[in-house]
Image (cartoon, grey):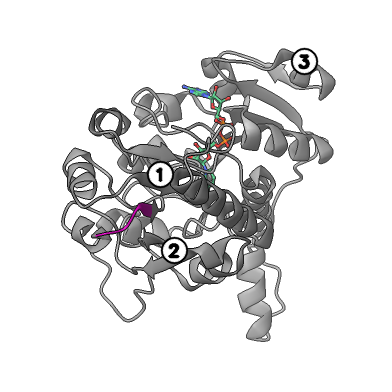
């Protein structure tokens, strides 16, 4: 049996990791708390550690894990901004991720958020349940004929772009590594970032969090956008400078914001804090705008995605144990 410490475990993690093929060869140690240098000790005698987006695998934490006998860090997510890869390499810890569990899940949630926000479906749902059948204040706009700007045309951005094309929207895209054949085949035009910001009625972020993409949406980039622009972020919270976004919302420059990720989501998203006092003033502020819609990092949460995350994670844990190569494209 391969001892594996799973951090930040939720019921759906237990369910999908527990029932995937090969799971019976792994002795799962499910922890509800997140990984950090303080909690690394809970991985004592484990060969593998399995973490998610808000776990913190910094240098100190990785050193502790290695000293406890851990050989592999398996991220059950695509983004890997929360692990110090240089430190992992130095220390000799292998690290793998699940690069594409379901780009459709995230792209579909992106579009779902926009439709909900724009057509005010969340408000209508609550109204009708209160027997308020009035339509006042529920006016939205057609996506057909609008210009959608996709920033980052990797796996998720490309699917989102194609869905928006299906609505009859014009799609412009920015990516430092453009996929010209894909763009031509789908009637999508690559433009410079400034052009995209100025031309788009709807802007959707699909870039990883890197030093150069941190606060990509800031006071300057917001000022370049069209008045009334809708912004959707299902990528990483730190792509947006929240203070600048709140200022642009208060100035009514931004027409709507849909977020599945938030700059300071750690310790808040994924948790049931109902009945508690929310200590984050910026999140509190965002929550009271009628034109802001927030989901708590659930874009990935489909049956298909959870099954694929479990499948890839388990195969990599088994591969490490038997000294076989990790699945293609999963090594960090
Ligand atoms: P990907 O690696 O396939 O694509 C990322 C794209 O961004 C690439 O084409 C890359 O060239 C481009 N890029 C890099 N730097 C850029 C920049 N400065 N400006 C514009 N484009 C840039 O990644 P993906 O699978 O499409 O995922 C995108 C992001 O979505 C992930 O990094 C992750 O943070 C996020 N994500 C969120 C969820 C969720 O549940 N909300 C789930 C999965 C992934």
- Residue 93 is inside the magenta segment: no
Q: Secondary structure at mark 2?
A: loop
**Which sits in the foreground, 221 or 61?**
61
Determine which residue is flagged by label 1. 237
Is ligand 1 closer than 8 angstroms to the Cβ of mark 3? no
Determine which residue is flagged by label 3. 181
Position of residue 157 in the picture relative to residue 314 (left or right):
right
Examine the rendered structure and indicate whether residue 331 appears above or below residue 123.
Answer: above
Quarter of the image holding residue 154?
A: top right
Callout 1 crowding tier (Cα within 10 Å): few <14, some 14–19, many ≥20: many
Q: Identify the disc placed on residue 1.
A: 2
Residue 331 % position (x, y): 48, 33
**Which sits in the foreground, 179 or 227?**
179
Between label 2 and label 3, give the one nearer the viewer: 2
Q: Quadrant of the C terminus?
A: top left
Is ligand 1 closer than 8 angstroms to the Cβ of mark 2? no
Mark before the other along the chain sequence, 1 or 3: 3
Callout 2 crowding tier (Cα within 10 Å): few <14, some 14–19, many ≥20: few
Residue 138 % position (x, y): 66, 62
Between label 1 and label 2, give the one nearer the viewer: 2
**Residue at 81% from the left image edge and 41% from the top image edge:** 167
**Residue at 63% from the left image edge and 63% from the top image edge:** 137
Q: What's the magenta bit mostly, secondary-structure-wise?
A: loop
* Residue at the bottom extreme of this rendering: 131
Callout 3 crowding tier (Cα within 10 Å): few <14, some 14–19, many ≥20: few
Q: Secondary structure at mark 3?
A: helix
Residue 108 % position (x, y): 69, 49
Mark before the other along the chain sequence, 2 or 3: 2
Position of residue 195 in the picture relative to residue 265 (left or right):
right
**Residue at 23% from the left image edge and 49% from the top image edge:** 65
For the magenta stretch, what is the residue range?
45-49
- Residue 48 is inside the magenta segment: yes
């Amino acid at each position: 049996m391969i001892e594996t410490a799973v951090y930040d475990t939720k019921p759906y993690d237990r369910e999908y990791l527990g029932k995937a093929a090969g799971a019976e060869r792994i002795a799962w140690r499910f922890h509800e708390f997140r990984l950090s240098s303080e909690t690394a000790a809970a991985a004592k005698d484990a060969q593998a550690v399995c973490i998610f987006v808000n776990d913190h695998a910094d240098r100190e934490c990785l050193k502790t894990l290695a000293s406890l006998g851990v050989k592999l860090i398996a991220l059950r997510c695509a983004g890997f901004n929360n692990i110090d890869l240089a430190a992992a390499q130095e220390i000799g810890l292998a690290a793998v991720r699940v690069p594409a569990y379901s780009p459709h899940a995230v792209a579909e949630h992106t579009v779902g958020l926009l439709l909900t926000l724009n057509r005010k479906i969340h408000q209508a749902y609550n109204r009708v349940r209160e027997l308020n059948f009035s339509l006042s204040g529920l006016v939205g706009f057609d996506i057909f004929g609008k210009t959608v700007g996709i920033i980052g045309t990797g796996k998720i951005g490309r699917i989102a772009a194609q869905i928006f094309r299906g609505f009859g929207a014009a799609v412009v895209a920015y990516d430092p590594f453009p996929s010209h054949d894909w763009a031509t085949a789908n009637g999508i035009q690559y433009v410079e970032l400034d052009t995209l910001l100025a031309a788009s009625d709807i802007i959707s972020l699909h870039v990883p969090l890197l030093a150069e993409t941190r606060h990509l949406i800031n006071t300057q980039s917001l000022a370049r956008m069209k008045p009334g622009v809708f912004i959707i972020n299902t990528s990483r919270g730190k792509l947006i400078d929240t203070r600048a976004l709140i200022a642009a919302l208060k100035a009514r420059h931004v027409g709507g914001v849909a977020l599945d990720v938030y700059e300071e989501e750690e310790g808040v998203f994924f948790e049931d804090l109902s009945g508690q006092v929310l200590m984050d003033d910026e999140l509190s502020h965002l929550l009271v705008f009628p034109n802001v819609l927030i989901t708590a990092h659930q874009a990935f949460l489909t049956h298909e995605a959870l099954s694929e995350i479990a499948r890839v994670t388990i195969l990599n844990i088994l591969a490490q144990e038997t000294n076989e190569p990790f699945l293609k494209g999963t090594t960090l």
